[in-house]
Structure formats: structure tokens, C-alpha cells
Image (cartoon, helix red, strand yellow):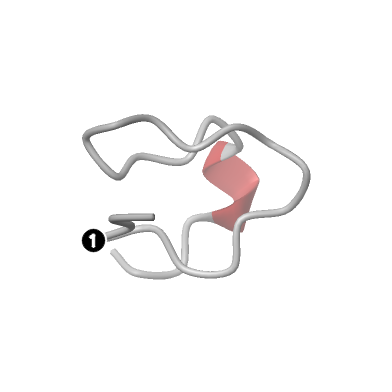
Amino acid sequence: MGVSGCIACTNEMVLSSGSCRNVREWRGL
């Protein structure tokens, strides 16, 4: 659970790099 950059990801899978597959849920940037 190392989410560094992606905040509150929905049912989308979170990449190991901490990136959200759902660009619409990108709030950390």
C-alpha cells in the first residue's frame, strides 16, 4: 500500500509506482 501521489483511488487498480489508472481520480497532482 505505497500510494505516493495518488489519493483516494476508486475501484481502479493502483500501479506500483503510485499512479492511478483512473486519471479522473488524480487529486495528488
At horizontal 59% and vertical 68% (from top left) the residue drawn is 8
> Residue 15 is drawn in which quadrant?
top left
| Extreme residue toward the front, this view | 1
Horizontal side, residue 8 vs residue 18: left or right: right
Residue 16 lies, in percent from the top left, at 29, 32
At horizontal 53% and vertical 40% (from top left) the residue drawn is 23
Say what amino acid the circle numbered 1 marks. Ser
Q: Which residue is mark 1?
A: 4
When the figure is inspected, residue 17 is found, relative to residue 10, above or below; the finding is above
Residue 4 lies, in percent from the top left, at 23, 61
At horizontal 39% and vertical 58% (from top left) the residue drawn is 6
Q: Using a 10 Å C-alpha cutoff, classify the residue at mark 1 as few (fewer than 14 neighbours), some (14 to 19) or many (20 or more).
A: few
Which residue is more in the foreground, 8 or 25? 8
Query: What count of labels does the image hold?
Result: 1
Which residue is more in the foreground, 16 or 24? 16
Q: Secondary structure at mark 1?
A: loop
Residue 12 lies, in percent from the top left, at 68, 36
At horizontal 29% and vertical 45% (from top left) the residue drawn is 18
Residue 24 lies, in percent from the top left, at 62, 48
Horizontal side, residue 11 vs residue 21: left or right: right
